[in-house]
Amino acid sequence: MEASSMTTRPLDRLIRPKSIAVFGGKEARRVIEQCNKMGFAGEIWPVHPKLDDVLGRKCYRSVADLPAAPDAAFVGVNRQLTIEIIRDLSARGAGGAICYASGFREAVNELSDGNELQSALVEAAGDMAVVGPNCYGFINMLDGALLWPDQHGMVRADKGVAVLTQSSNIACNVSMQMRGLPLAYLMTAGNQAQMGLSDLACAVIEDPRVTAVGLHIEGFDSIEALQRLAKRARELKKPVVTLKVGKSEAAQLATVSHTASLAGNDAVSSALLARLGIGRVDTLPELLETLKLLHLHGTLKSFDISSMSCSGGEASLMADAGVGRKVVYRALKDAQRQPLRESLGEMVTISNPLDYHTFVWGNREKQTTAFSAMMKGDYAINLIVLDFPRQDRCDAADWVTTCDAVIDASRATGAVAGIVASLGENMPEETALRLMAEKVVPFSGIEEALTACEISAEIGRLWAQPEAGPLLAVSHSEGDSVTLSEHEAKSELAAFGLTIPQGLTAETAEQAADAAEKLGFPVVLKGQGVAHKTEAGAVKLNLASREAVLEAARAMAGVASGYLVEKMVAKPVAELIVGAMRDPVAGPVLTVGAGGILVELLEDSAILTLPTDENAIRKALSGLKVAKLLGGYRGQPKGDVDALVKAVASVASYVVSNASMIEEVDINPIMVLPEGLGTVAADALIRRRGRGA
């Protein structure tokens, strides 16, 4: 992206226009057709060099001939002419434009002038907002304003969610959904020459008729705009959920440590979104189902949910789908059990998930009583599994009765309720629309329903915490990167509070033996200037005599450029890795995880975006598998978690203080000693640019 600034390029006129100018032939005509079809009440001005009218609307010859500066323009002409029209629209004071043409930066592999034309486009736009190029445009169903050159499946709405994507085809697909989701805005961003997805989202979230925002992200556009969006979403209580696909821009991967491979761009993306209080889903159906819940009820108050169905098989599906998730089928309260027993009979096992059999099937009053008893359990949401029969071949009267009972129970108790079709196609659109109108969430798919509940509750949890400060915003130092020696790296980290072993450097085997005697045995001997010491045979542990040190030093002389002699660290409770790397989007990030020889084997790590604090560090550590060792696994001593938290915080402080220079930090392992005995950084690597490089 070239640049974007919501302060200099407001989008209100563009996305909520009262006048639209259209440029071009076939695509421009389709824009007029769609606006006519959806009842756009504003002015539409076709611009064409030869035609006198389009669909009964007077044609103008140029931007200069228009009655006034249009609020929005759809520019559907070739790429060269696009730049001229954008320049004229900007000079006239237009509100903004959609650039339909392709052949800009997205096509640089095929067209050598793609970059040059994209720069010319941004320059021509000046302070006027431009969306695209290679962009289908957007649909505003609140006002019937469609700068959209194609068919779609949407209807007018009084309020609803906004879905934004870089992909025009994904937008077309979303427009055709039959899930009952009210779509207020559907927007595409194209190749984001000037306006990115986050900029557009920042604009639509301000519309009071928008309830929630969904983003389909292929690559983050502007971290500043994303942070603005997250902050405003929290202030307005309008949740944002993302489908982040692919990998972010390739990081400069390190060749000398484990940190980069552990972090991974996708893991950084998840950590970044969590920091901002933005939900993340994995599939398009999950995105739409989550938006349904967020549209009706916003964030859930907890992860506690209930489930009822008239089949043991469905109850088992629901129970199994909850395994490994944050949602909890919390046990029933004592006050619920007797009302459920009375309404369902003695043969029903009273539990959660609950199989209520078919004893009350088709009886609205008894079903309402049973559903109400479950909904009085103070669950965040109450789910009822119900797959509808085919509308063309079967009678759905009893299923409608069950819907009526769920609606009645939800009204009577004030509880949040959802009906879940285990197979997405078994939730008819007509039924979904009716349930949405009654504020009952019509979920298509069990996994999608539980994901929606989980994401909604997680956003609520994140919003309940203090808002995280802004990410580090630092420029990257110039110059070649260098790798510090282990001794240099440890010395720099020790200055920020990290505990390191007592150690001395030596140039020869004799000097190494002298250093060992001075430190006191046993010692560790390491060859300096070796990237992967263990694999190269350049590290020897538990050397208990001068002779042992001499022998070890001479054995590694062929690969080492000197020696580091350190006091041997006592047996730890656990070994962890703490590292830092520079992500191209989030900037410097911290990695914590199981270290030592287990680092690749377990792949047990968490990402901390920076700056961070001890509370966030403690939470990240508690989520690791290795946390069981730290807690005293099977009678073993507990690790000094407080000291570990402080050790990680000291590394974070070092990285923040040197953010412009840091390429990579890799401390593996940090030895966590028994409770009260602290931690020791047994090995450390720093790669950086700038000062000292």
Image: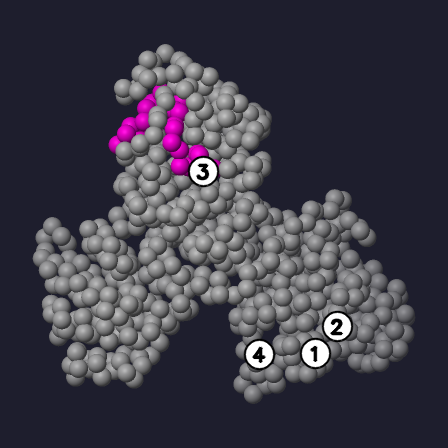
Horizontal arrangement in the rendering, residue 24 relative to residue 371 (left or right): right
Residue of label 4: 629
Spatial CA span between label 2 and label 3: 55 Å
Q: Which region of the structure is painted magenta? A: 11-37
Classify the position of the N terminus by image quarter.
top right
Q: Position of residue 42 (x, y in %)?
A: 34, 30
Q: Who comes first in sequence, dot 2 or dot 3?
A: 3
Spatial CA span between label 1 and label 2: 8 Å
| Label 4 SS | helix
Spatial CA span between label 4 and label 3: 55 Å
Q: Please state the total of marks drawn on the protein image.
A: 4
Residue of label 1: 678
What residue appears at the point 45 percent right and 40 percent down from the top-left corner? 166
Residue nearest the viewer, comparing 352 with 87? 87
The three-letter amino acid code for the residue at tag 4 is: Leu
What residue appears at the point 72 percent right and 61 percent down from the top-left corner? 654
Residue 554 visible within the image: no
Q: Who comes first in sequence, dot 4 or dot 3?
A: 3
Q: Which mark is residue 499?
A: 2
Residue of label 3: 12
Corner quadrant of residue 74: top left
Corner quadrant of residue 448: bottom left
The three-letter amino acid code for the residue at tag 3 is: Asp
Per the image, is 14 magenta?
Answer: yes
Spatial CA span between label 3 and label 1: 57 Å
Q: Position of residue 630 (x, y in %)?
A: 59, 78
Residue nearest the viewer, comparing 222 with 595? 222
Q: Position of residue 439 (x, y in %)?
A: 27, 59
CB-based contact (under 8 Å), mark 4 and mark 3: no
The three-letter amino acid code for the residue at tag 2 is: Thr
